[in-house]
Image (spheres, grey):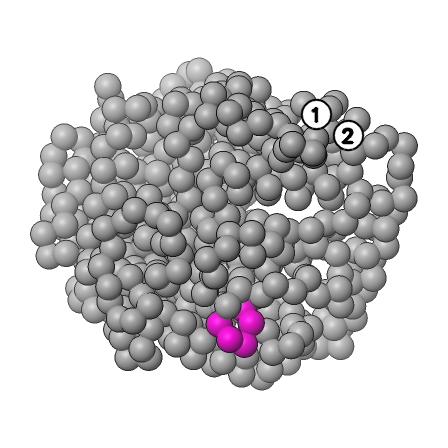
Amino acid sequence: MSQPKTISQFLVPDWVDSTLFKGMLRGIERESLRMQNNGFLSQADHPRSLGSALTHPHITTDYSEALMEFITPPKASISEALNFLTDIHAVVNRHLENGEKLWTLSMPCMLDEKEENIRLAQYGTSNIGQFKTLYRHGLGIRYGRRMQTISGVHYNVSFPDILFEQLQQHEQDDALKVLSLQDYRSHRYLGLIRNFIRLTPLVMYLVGASPSVCKCFMTGREHQLLPLIKGTLFLPYATALRMGRFGYQNSAQKQLGIHYNNLDSYVAELQKAVNSPYAQFSRLGLNNAAGEPIQINDHVLQIENEYYSLVRPKQVPQAGETPSQALANRGIGYVELRAVDVNPYSAIGINEDTAGFLEVVALYCLLQDSPDLWDDEQDVIEQNQTEVVNRGRAPNAKIIEAGTEYPLLEWLQQHLDAMQPLAALLNQTYSTHLYGQALDVMQKRVDDVDETLSAQVIADTMEYGGTWSFGGHMANQHIESYEQHVLSPETLAYFEGLTQTSLTEQQQLEQDTSISFEDYLSKFR
């Protein structure tokens, strides 16, 4: 099995210059629970004054009715993306009702003992709306509803074609030189993805912010977490429990054999999973005693989005396309980095240091050699991830790479050093200091473990007397930040317009009664 090169061998090719990155795009998706004034998960409907969660392009819901998701369009700079995300938060804050607030941590606010009180997201009576709710019901019976209350940040990045054209011209392999630009771009994005998977322990250590959980989250689950303070459980050196076995897990997915070595194979493997029955899910049944559907199907994946991964190849689907069909038809258009915790100290869940760092990491992963990633190496990577999730801040934390064991901090340092020239190039591209400053912030977290977000979350959870008290304190601070953010008349008009058009679009979908939901579902099944 080919192994990745040792870290110190990476050098930026001498033909790469800062002009090649002009035209990069980034978009951000941030999830946040709506929380009642008493700290418990909201039981209220998604505010109608924000429009339709089914058809609104920027303000929707994820698993539960209370789990909001805010989506920016692709933007030409980090500051534009963060400003748009701030606008969304400020708009939403104006429309929250009955003293509700946006929860500030990746791990959830208080949940009561009854799982059914985690309400499934509702999208109305159209077939697609009912289908989306049924999918969530299926997730609930497969994995439990608690798991679906976790929030994250997804960072989407694309690079301009000029960069891929230059990379292709400098290839030594003739087979790569003759690929179409679309196929070559997909080839390089898959290389980025494989390298990002190898580097997820670095991301988890540097931006992980979920070292502890509210005790209520672990109701009915066996665990080895320890009491930190009343109502809060933790592991002493944890960084990102959201990314470990208490976070998003799918036992069925281990057997899928989905790899990122070739786009055709990836698409075929994903589609096979959507069409392969899985005994454990078959035993749950398709319908309840009353004949009502309880999951879309009994397959390993109900739909492709059920495949939980740390990073995803993406292409914008056109009407009627599944995500994998869009990839097969037009190749990879951008990459979604998903291993990012919500930063509780930022009112929008992410700040420019994390954004700049993620873009440097993405470029680093794109430009490096990226050997195929097979199961043997994947097993080692998962060991590394588990080590950093559970005990990344331990003085003796270790990473295994290419058969060699490294002290974690030494491994982190080698990668940060290798990224410095790329931060300098991106600074030149955008006439900014942002990227260098972002790596300086990450360097401080390597130099002093108490500077990590996970260490700060533990210290502040102790100071405020528990997860809810800390999260509630930050939620109140963030409300002040939203209220101080100035929304221009144009921005207000834009969001008010989307409220109306999204409600109208949902209504139009609901008026189409050409096929019943039973027939719609049976056609899909």
Q: Is residue 489 visible to us here?
A: yes
Image quarter of residue 100: bottom right
Q: Earlier in the sequence, mark 1 or mark 2?
A: 2
Identity of the residue drawn at 35% across and 48% down? 221
Is residue 110 shown above or below 217? below
| Mark 2, secondary structure of its residue | helix
Looking at this view, is 263 or 128 the one in front? 128
Which residue in the rendered view is the most extreme toward the top?
175
**Res 524 label:** 1
Task: From the viewer's perspective, tell me whether residue 407 is left or right of residue 343.
Answer: left
Image quarter of residue 139: top right
Q: Position of residue 461 (x, y in %)?
A: 31, 73
Q: Position of residue 313 (x, y in %)?
A: 51, 35
Image quarter of residue 296: top right
Q: For marks 1 and 2, give the CA distance.
A: 10 Å
Identity of the residue drawn at 11% across and 48% down? 407
Q: Position of residue 294 (x, y in %)?
A: 62, 35
Q: Quadrant of the C terminus?
A: top right
| Mark 1, secondary structure of its residue | helix
Identity of the residue drawn at 33% across and 26% down? 373
Q: Position of residue 27 (x, y in %)?
A: 56, 53
Q: Amino acid at mark 2?
A: Glu
Residue assigned mark 2? 518
Whether 451 is among the magenta residues is: no
Q: Amino acid at mark 1?
A: Phe
Is residue 21 shown above or below 213? above
Q: Is residue 71 visible to us here?
A: no
Residues rendered magenta in the picture: 35-39
